[in-house]
Every structure is written in structure tokens, then in C-alpha cells.
């Protein structure tokens, strides 16, 4: 079976999961963290090398202050509680998104997680936090524009490959598979550049209900897809 090296997940539906149970949204987010733990534990055994999770988007700031603060708190709790276990299990933590827009204590915690786990190799867990695809592309364009302005590079030298190198995901391969839970059929500003040729799997289940079985099913679905990258399927290429 062809297994994608990089799977990216839009962890959506925490609020609706909670609502369906008559619970506050925070309870849904807490259950979502538990689903994330299980998924991270399952990923290496399923042959996944990179797992990217969308945890907080650059548009999620528009939610009520109390929910934003709950989500910031949960991230801090997750890093504090799970960092030792992640490190022990050989997980390398990487953050993508605009760190500069986060509170200093969160930034420090994220830096610490990245530094501590830098040389781990069993799984790279990429956490997209304060992440938006458009924001990432704009920041990359600014970096390149500054390099051109200072004469460091020539604008003709900017290729798609070079541009990708200026993104937050510089040394991370593109995701071959993007999964979204909760039944919504959209990307919501997730990995706009990197997902150009990703296979998409949309699942009706809410994120807190996501399990190893859902992940294994999505991988089977992926294995059955024919990926052409704009070319032709092998059987259609004239010999
Ligand atoms: C995903 O669940 C978590 C974040 C976006 C932070 P939601 O909070 O979006 O849950 P729904 O979509 O309202 O059910
Ligand atoms: C996407 O979910 C962001 C995360 C999962 C972190 P949203 O719930 O924010 O997306 P929309 O608003 O339904 O598009
Ligand atoms: Mg949502």
C-alpha cells in the first residue's frame, strides 16, 4: 500500500461535538486535545513521517475573547503536559504560523519544544498555530522582496522552489494527504501553497471522535487514488 509520508489534518468540529452533548465548547476543545494525543501516538505505526495539525488559524482570533483564551491555555497545557512524552517517543515538534503574533510566554514554550526535540526522528509533528496560508505566503513574499531589495538575490532567481523555501514549511515535504473532519468541505486557509496536489479526504465525524481507525481508513482511501500531477495515467501514455 502507498502510504503518504506527510498527512495534514484540519481538526474541526470540537464545538459541535460539545454542543451535541450539551457541554460548553471548551469541553469539545479538551476532547479534541485527547484525539490529537491518540493520533500522534498512532501515526508512526501507520508509516507516517510528518503529521501536520491545524490547531489555531490566523482567522480564529475573531472568536469570542474567552474562547481564544481557552485555546491559548490548551496549547500551553498540551506542551507542558506532553512535551516529555513526545520527546521520549522520538517526536520532533515544529511550529508553523506567525509566532510574532503570539504572547511571549507561548512563544517561549513553543521555542523550547522545538529546541528540545530538534534531533528526534520517529515523527515530525508540525503544529499550525496562528497559521494562515495567505499570511504565510505574504510573509514569504516580504522576505524575498527584502532579499531582492538588498541585492542578495536577483528577482529572476525566484522560482517556485525558492519561494517554497521562504515558507514556514521550508524543509518539510508537501502533504500528500489532507484530512478534514466535521463534514465541512473547505480548506479554510490551510496549507494553500503546499496542498497544491494533495489528495483530500473529508470525514463527517467531529474531531474529538477521530480515531486510529479513521486515520487508517483515510490512508486506504489515499492508496486507491490515482495521482497524476497534471500528467497522464501510465495506461494512457502511448508506448
Ligand atoms: C476546531 O473546532 C478547533 C478550532 C478551530 C480551534 P471548532 O471550534 O471549529 O468546532 P466547530 O467547527 O465550531 O464545531
Ligand atoms: C479551521 O477550522 C481552523 C482549525 C481547525 C484550527 P474553522 O472552524 O476555523 O474553519 P471555518 O470557520 O469553518 O472555515
Ligand atoms: Mg470549526
Image (cartoon, rainbow, N blue to C red):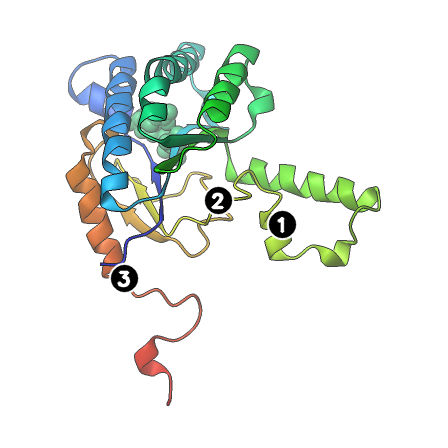
Q: Residues within 10 Å of mark 2 (few under 14, many from 20)?
A: some
- Residue at disc 1, secondary structure: helix
Q: Position of residue 9 (x, y in %)?
A: 34, 38
Q: Mark 2 falls on what kind of element? A: loop
Q: Name the residue at 40% across, 48% down.
A: 175
Question: On the image, which quarter does residue 206 sit in?
Answer: top left
Instruction: Name the residue tied to disc 2.
Output: 172
First reached walking from the N terminus: tag 2 or tag 1: 1
Q: Residue at x 76, y 54 (%)?
A: 155
- 172 left or right, relative to 139: left
Q: What is the CA distance from the residue labelled 2 to the residue labelled 1?
A: 13 Å
Q: Is mark 1 within 8 Å of ligand 2?
A: no
The crowding category of the residue bearing disc 1, from other C-alpha atoms within 10 Å (few below 14, some 14 to 19, many at least 20), is some
**Mark 3 or 2, which is nearer the eye?**
2
Residue 156: name its quadrant: bottom right
Residue topped by disc 3: 225
Amino acid at each position: 500500500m502507498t502510504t503518504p509520508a506527510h498527512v495534514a489534518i484540519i481538526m474541526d468540529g470540537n464545538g459541535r461535538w460539545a454542543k451535541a452533548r450539551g457541554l460548553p465548547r471548551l469541553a469539545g476543545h479538551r476532547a479534541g486535545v485527547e484525539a490529537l494525543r491518540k493520533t500522534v501516538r498512532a501515526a508512526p505505526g501507520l508509516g507516517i513521517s510528518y503529521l501536520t495539525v491545524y490547531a489555531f488559524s490566523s482567522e480564529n482570533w475573531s472568536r469570542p475573547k474567552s474562547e481564544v483564551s481557552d485555546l491559548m491555555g490548551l496549547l500551553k497545557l498540551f506542551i507542558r503536559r506532553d512535551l516529555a512524552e513526545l520527546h521520549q517517543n522520538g517526536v520532533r515538534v515544529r511550529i508553523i504560523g506567525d509566532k510574532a503574533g503570539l504572547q511571549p510566554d507561548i512563544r517561549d514554550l513553543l521555542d523550547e519544544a522545538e529546541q528540545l526535540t530538534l534531533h528526534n526522528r520517529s515523527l515530525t509533528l508540525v503544529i499550525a498555530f496562528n497559521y494562515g496560508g495567505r499570511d504565510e505566503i505574504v510573509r514569504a513574499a516580504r522576505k524575498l522582496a527584502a532579499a531582492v531589495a538588498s541585492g542578495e538575490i536577483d528577482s529572476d532567481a525566484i522560482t517556485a522552489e525558492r519561494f517554497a523555501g521562504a515558507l514556514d514549511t521550508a524543509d518539510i515535504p508537501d502533504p500528500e494527504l489532507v484530512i478534514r473532519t466535521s463534514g465541512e468541505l473547505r480548506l479554510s486557509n490551510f496549507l494553500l501553497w503546499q496542498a497544491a496536489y494533495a489528495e483530500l479526504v473529508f470525514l463527517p465525524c467531529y474531531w474529538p471522535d477521530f480515531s486510529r481507525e479513521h486515520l487508517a481508513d483515510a490512508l486506504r482511501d489515499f492508496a486507491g487514488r490515482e495521482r497524476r500531477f497534471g500528467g497522464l495515467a501510465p495506461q494512457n501514455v502511448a508506448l
